[in-house]
Amino acid sequence: MAPRLSLVRKLVAFTPLAGTLAVPVVVPLLMVRVGIGAGVAAAVLLSSLWFVAMLRTSEMPQHD
């Protein structure tokens, strides 16, 4: 069970970093190359997916 736990911990650590890097890179590129509407749509979609991923991978303290 140790390798799976390690993978989950890496995913938890990578999730905030992925969104922090993806949103500011993808949105302006889409705005310049495709249009403002595509950039706004990408911002909403990426931010929503990132928010859901952050909630799904969050670690809560154990309560006994």
Image: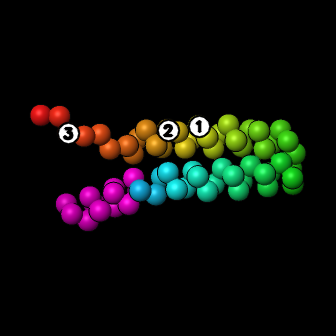
Q: Which residue is mark 3?
A: 62
Residue at 52% in and 56% down: 17
Taking the image as shown, residue 64 lies to the left or right of residue 26, namely: left
Disc 1 from disc 2: Cα separation: 6 Å
Q: Residues within 10 Å of mark 2 (few under 14, many from 20)?
A: few
* Residue to which mark 1 is pinned: 48
Tag 3: amino acid? Gln
Q: Nearer the viewer, mark 3 or mark 1?
A: 3
Inter-mark Cα distance, 3 to 1: 27 Å
In front: 2, or 28? 28
Image location of residue 54, percent across then percent down: 46, 43
Mark toward the start of the polypeptide (3 vs 2) = 2
Would you say 59 lies left or right of 53 here?
Answer: left
Callout 1–callout 2 Cβ contact below 8 Å = yes
- Above-or-below relation of 46 to 6: above
Residue hosting label 2: 52
Q: Is residue 59 left or right of residue 18?
A: left
**Which element is circle 3 on?**
loop
Image coordinates for residue 19, horizontal then vertical, percent: 57, 51
Q: How many marks?
A: 3
Q: Position of residue 36 (x, y in %)?
A: 85, 42
